[in-house]
Image (spheres, coloured by chain):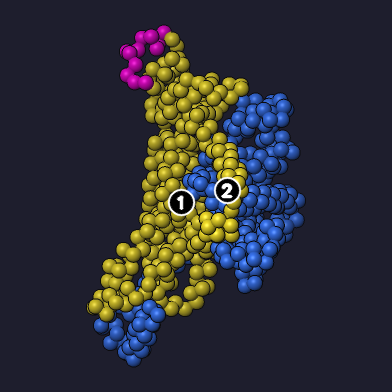
Chain colours: A yellow, B blue
Amino acid sequence: MSSVNAAHSVVEPTPTSKRIAGAIVILYALVTMIPLAWIFLTSIKSPPDSISYPPKIVFSPTLEGYCNLFTTRTRQTPDYIQSLPPPTGTCDEITRSRNMVIAGPSNYWPRFGNSLVIAFGSTFLAVLLGTFAAYGFSRFRVPLADDLLFFILSTRMMPPIAVAIPIYLMYRQFGLSDTALGMILLYTAVNVSLAVWLLKGFIDEIPREYEEAAMIDGYTRLQAFWKVVLPQATTGIAATAIFCLIFAWNEYAFAVLLTSGSAQTAPSFIPTIIGEGGQDWPAVAAGTTIFLMPILVFTIILRKQLLRGITFGAVRK
Amino acid sequence: MTDAPSTIAERSAEVLVRSTPTVIARRVRGLSDRAIAWLFITPTIALLLAINIFPLIWAVYLSFTNFRANRPNAEITGVGLRNYQRVLNDPDIWIAMQTTAHFVFWTILLQTVIGFSLAYLIDRKFRGHAFWTTVILIPMMLSPAVVGNFWRFLYQPQIGLFNYIVSYFSGIPPSSFEMLGSVSLAPWAIIIVDTWMWTPYVMLICLAGLRSIPDYIYEAAEVDRASAWRQFWSITVPMALPFIMLAVLFRGIENFKMFDMVMLLTGGGPGSTTEVASITLKREAFESWLTGRSSAFAIILFVAVFGLANIYVKALNKVKQR
C-alpha cells in the first residue's frame, strides 16, 4: 500500500466509479434542460419555423415572438400598408412583413407588473409577520407552542381549490375579487406558514447569549431584537423572502380562480396568449422565457438554502 | 467547556427574573416578555384565522346547504348530510380519486427511484458535482402552470419535440401517437412532466440523507469486510430512510392537491382520463356552481390529506427513533 492510499479514506469512491457517476448525472442534467432550452429556442423562432417538421434546431433567429408578445396586431391590405409612413422599429417592420399593423400594446407587461406587485407585496408582509412570530416562538415559552406551529403548517396542506371556494365568496362580499390587495392578502396567508417555520429555524441558530449580553448592557428586549437579532438573521430573512417570492410568482390556482382582469397575474395570462389560428407558440415561449428568468437567477443565488426552504426547515444539512 | 459560563449566566438570569416582581420588570424593561411574545405572534395567527380558518368554517357551513354561488339571492336551505352522501356515492368522484391515486403512486415511485439514484451518484463527489446539482434543481423552482403550458407544445403529435425524440430512438412515426389526446397515454403525459419537475426535489432531500451518514460507519463495515451490496442495503438505505419518507410525504401531499400543471396540460381530458380530484372540484365549484356540494367534497379532501399526513408523520417519527 502506498502512502497516498493509506491517507485515502476507505469510504472515498474510486476514480472510475466517480467518472461513471459523473457521466450519468451530467447526462441526466442535460436531458432535463432540453425542455427549457426548447422554450428559449422557440421564443426566437418565426411562427412557421416553430411548427416545422422535423423540429428545427438550426434556423435564423427573429424577434417576432417577442414582438407578438408585446403587441396586438390587425391584418390589413397590402395597399394600406404601402400607404403608411416607413416603419419606426424592428417590431413594426416584422409585423408589416406579415401583412399586419401594430394596433397597440398587449396585456403582457401590465400582467407582469401585477405579478411583481402581488409577489413583492405578499412577500414583504409574510416576512414581516413571519419574523415577529418566529422570534416569538423561538425565544419565549408560548403556551401550546407546538400546537400553534402545527396549526400554522396545516393551513398549507389544504388543497388550494378547496380554500378558493369560500375565499371566492368572501372576496365577492368584501369587494376584493380581482384586486391586487386581495391577492396580496391571500398569498401572505399562504406564505406566512413557510416564513414562520423557516425563520424559526434560522433564529433558533442565533445564540441567545447575544441578546442577553445586550440586555445586560441596558437594551430593552425590543432593542435587542432590533439591533442584535435582526442583523444576525439577515441571511435567513433574505432566503425566506426569496422562497415566498418564488411561491407567489409561480402560483396559478388562486390566480386563475380569483382574478380575471385588472389583477390577473402572468401565470394565468401566459396560457391565454393566442395568435391567428391557435396558440402563437413563439409568443408564448417569449412570455415564458421572460417570466422564468428571475426564478433562474434566484435559484442560483439560493442553491445553498434550497434544501431548507423546500422542507419547511425540517432538513438543515 | 465554552458552554459553562453561559449556562451559569442563563441560570442566574432566570433566578433574577423569577425573583423580580413582574410589575417592576415591566417598568424596567418596557414591555414584559409575555406581552412581547403575544404581540409578535398574534398578527400571524389573526391573518391565518381571517384568510384560512374563517373561510374553512364558512365552507363547512355551506357544505350543509344547497347554496349556489351563481344564485346569491336564492333562499339557502339546510340539506343536512345530503351533500356528503351524494359526493361519497358519486361514481365520477370515485373515478377522480382513482385517477389521483394512480398519479400520486406513479409520480412518487418514479421520483423516489430516480431521485435516490441521482443522489447516490452525486454523493460519489465527482468533479463539478456542485455545479451539476444546481443545474438539476432548476425545473422544480419553475412555475408548474407556465412550464406545464409549454409542455403542451412539446407533446404536439406532429411537430412536438417529445414525439420527435421518441420516434428518433424507437422508429415509431411521430404522428402515430398523441401523448395528450389518447386515453391510454394522457395519464402518463402528466406523470412524465411531474417527474421531470419534481425528481430534483426528492434528489435534494435524499442527498441530505446520504450526507448525514457518518463515514465511520462505512469504515467499520469495511473493517468487517461487508460487501458494497451489503453496505448499501444495511447502512445506506436504512439510514437515509427517514429522509426518503419525508420527501415522499411532501410530494404525496403536493400531488394529492395537484391542480395547475394538469389543468394546463390536459384540463382533465381526454374525456376525464386525467381529471384528478382538484380538477373535479374546480368543475363542480366554478363551472356547475354546486357550491354546497363542492364544499362538502372540499372538506372530504381536506380531511383525507390531513388524516393521511398525520398517519404518515407518526410512521416517520417511528423510523427516526429507530
Q: Which mark is residue A303?
A: 1
Give the x, y percent position of residue A124: 37, 55
Q: Chain of mark 1?
A: A
Q: Quadrant of residue B222?
A: bottom right
Is residue A204 in sight in this rendering? yes
- First to last magenta residue range: A79-90
Q: Residue at x 40, y 80 (%)?
A: B1
Q: Chain of mark 2?
A: A
Q: Which quadrant is home to the C terminus of chain B?
A: bottom right
Q: Residue at x 51, y 28 (%)?
A: A42
Q: Is residue A88 shown in magenta?
A: yes
Give the x, y percent position of residue B319: 65, 68
Between label 1 and label 2, give the one nearer the viewer: 2
Front-lying residue, A73 or A22: A22
Please state if B187 lies on the left or on the right of B11 as rendered: right
Q: Which residue is mark 2?
A: A15
Q: Is label 2 in a helix, a strand or a loop?
A: helix
Q: Is residue A233 shown in magenta?
A: no
Front-lying residue, A177 or B209: B209
The amino acid at mark 2 is: Pro
Q: Is the residue at mark 1 from the same chain as the one at mark 2? A: yes
Q: Residue at x 63, y 39 (%)?
A: B266
Q: Is label 1 in a helix, a strand or a loop?
A: loop
Q: Which mark is residue A116?
A: none
The amino acid at mark 1 is: Arg
Give the x, y percent position of residue B196: 60, 43
